[in-house]
Image (spheres, rainbow, N blue to C red):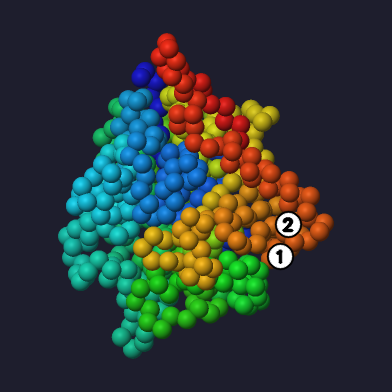
Amino acid sequence: MTVQKNVLLVTIDQLRADCLIGALAEHVDLPNLRALMQDATSFYQHYTVTSPCGPARISMLTGQYAMNHRSVRNGTPLRHDTLNIATEMRKAGYLPMLFGYTDTAADPRVHDPKDPAVQTYEYPMNGFHEMLEMRMEMSYPWRAHLKKKGYSFEGYENIYKPICPKDRAPEIGDPAFFKAEDSDTAFLTDRFLETISGYETENWFAHLTYIRPHWPLIAPEPYNRMYNPATLPMPVRAETAEKAAALHPFMGPAQCKETPESPCLGFPGFEINDATTQSARAVYLGLVSEVDLHIGRVLSFLKESGQYETTMVIVTSDHGELLGDHHAWGKKSVFDAAYHIPLIIRLPCNAEQAGTQVTKPTESIDLMPTILEWIGQEIPNSVDGRSLMPLLKKTMPEDWRDYTFSEFDFADIKTPTVWQEALGTDASESTLSILRDERFTLVEFACELPTILFDHTAAGEFENVAEQSEYQPDLIRLMRQLLRHRMRNMDHTLSLDQITKSGPIRQSRNRSN
């Protein structure tokens, strides 16, 4: 390779798109990400194709819809021979460096039951070279760092408990016991910068993954109280949780599935009310600002080392966060806040497109083919996504998609979920598909639940209009579109190969979704 082409893929866990483009944007200070947006192309209608963390990251890194890779829950194994961005970058001569985690559950068919690879859902995806293990439930190097710095804690879970005055109970917004300079976000960035500086003469590909602002919602000073809860907008929601639950049978269990109580450790007697909701939202934004600071350090390094003009920089998230919207939390939902995520791409030598926005629908599965096309590597037929290179060059294809598609599996193999218990569904039918176009959102279930149709020119996510007579033509059209989309995107790993008397032949895939 004669022309240096580096790739930096940054993933910020659980970051809502509207922190950068929307309702929360004016309430959070993100100078480095906003500066990057002015020097890059921002995608305003970018959606993850699935949730939660494991499935979302697998789709992003394989370029496949969940209906094809079928690693549909945290802990669901990914087939060991699934092609992904790391395996394909290796074919181009790159060492795929992982700083953080991919949340991949390994294939038990090729591992002994005692192998550590099948003792955690957070194992690195096949093909990646783990430069630094930084996982939500492990993070042994960070633990060692904290101990070396003199911090004392009994058990890893205590890392996420706050410190507070002895004369009162802990409160949301109380600080972490470690300094900001020793946080997981700071430690990850430090180790990345210490390592990547040695690769200045090489073509490199690095996947840098930040845990924050993923729960637990606890931050070091000053980020713990950087934002005043009283000045933040309230969540987008119905007047009461009961009214929100009445929208559809799926909604009531969704309110119970994820609440701030379980991940906010160290807060006995936590109550869900306006005060705690706003305090939790304030800490979330503080954690986002902390990540922004360290992304700024990474961008400064690229510029100072002369690699800014040889590196494709991608900043995105795996999925969103409800943050109390619709009286729900987390990302296991049907609402846009759980799926609408930021995407910023800076392409070297593309100054004429600096600061531009793309409003056409794009999906998380588009990143893998985009990277591969830029470095000149063939895109496998297994990839469902489409390269964003034409959009980055402002040459919009006539057949570009006019909708996005997402899936969510709400079952669990070990213990039935709140949905399974409330709705009486089994594992195979506890799944839903979402189709979004410019006006509507269609949600269809595999089980016997009513269809959901939101009209965003009317009441949007506050009214299900699927049963209203005037919407029946649109409902039928969208259902046909959903069916056709699934049919067109069935797994093409080998479907376009054929064995002949002269040997195997292959047809390249037309990725018009």
What secondary structure is marked by label 2? Answer: strand
Left or right of residue 185: residue 332: right
Which quadrant of the structure image shows residue 220?
Answer: bottom left
Q: Which mark is residue 3?
A: none
Q: Residue 455 carries which label?
A: 2
Number of other residues with Cα within 10 Å of mark 1, as a class: few under 14, some 14 to 19, many 20 or more: some
Which quadrant of the structure image shows residue 262?
Answer: bottom left
The image position of residue 294, as x and y in percent, is 39, 51
Amino acid type of the residue that numbered disc 1 sits on in the rendered structure: Glu
The extreme right residue here reads 470
Which quadrant of the structure image shows residue 7?
Answer: top left
What secondary structure is marked by label 1? Answer: loop
The image position of residue 292, as x and y in percent, is 44, 53
Left or right of residue 124: residue 492: right
**Residue nearest the viewer, comparing 355 with 422:** 422
Q: Name the image quarter holding the N terminus.
A: top left
Residue at 60% in and 61% down: 448
**Residue nearest the viewer, comparing 234 with 302:** 234
The extreme top residue here reads 502
Q: Is residue 335 something that shows in the picture?
A: yes
The image position of residue 218, as x and y in percent, is 38, 68
Q: Which mark is residue 463?
A: 1
Amino acid type of the residue that numbered disc 2 sits on in the rendered structure: Asp
